[in-house]
Amino acid sequence: MNSLVLDTDTVSRYRKGRLPASQLRHVEGSAICLSFPTVGELHRWAIVHRWGAASLGGFELWLTQNLRHFTDFAEHDGLRLLVA
């Protein structure tokens, strides 16, 4: 399975079901990878927009179920980055 790094906007659109079909095909056939800053940005969004416990819990569950690993770009060759 290929690894695909998703940026913050792509993760947001993917979780909302708003990712274009052309990009969705890439995501569904790949192991999702996120950089540490992307996870931080997503958590910051939740805090700034005062997500409730249910929304934040849903996000944490999604991370647990879908995130394959954090990505350190210096350690990998051939990573693909999908940007929305």
Image (spheres, grey):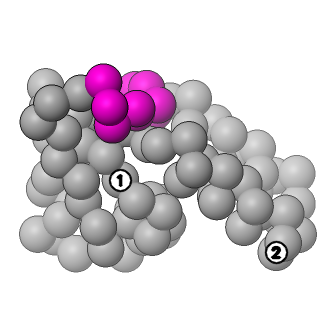
Q: Position of residue 36 (x, y in %)?
A: 56, 41
- The answer to whether 1 appears left or right of 59 in the picture is left
Q: Is residue 37 above or below residue 3?
A: below
x, y (%) of residue 65? 50, 30
Q: Gap in Å between the C-alphas at discs 1 and 2? A: 22 Å
Q: Nearer the viewer, mark 1 or mark 2?
A: 1
Few, some or many residues within 10 Å of mark 2 (<14, 14–19, 20+): few
Quarter of the view holding residue 17:
bottom left
Residue 30 shows in the view: no
Name the one closer to the observer, 41 or 14.
41
Q: Look at 64% across and 58% down and name the residue there.
A: 42
Mark 2 belongs to which amino acid?
His
For residue 1, say whether it is visible.
Answer: yes
Q: Is residue 69 magenta?
A: yes
* Residue that appears at 63% across and 36% down: 61
In the foreground, 70 or 58? 70
The amino acid type found where label 1 is placed reads Leu
State which region is magenta: 66-75
Q: Quadrant of residue 1?
A: top left
Q: Which residue is mark 2?
A: 49
The label shown at residue 71 is none
Report the residue at 33% width, 37% height from top.
Answer: 73
The residue under the point 14% across, 52% down is 26
| Residue, disc 1 | 6
Q: Is residue 47 placed above or below 74 in the rendered structure?
A: below
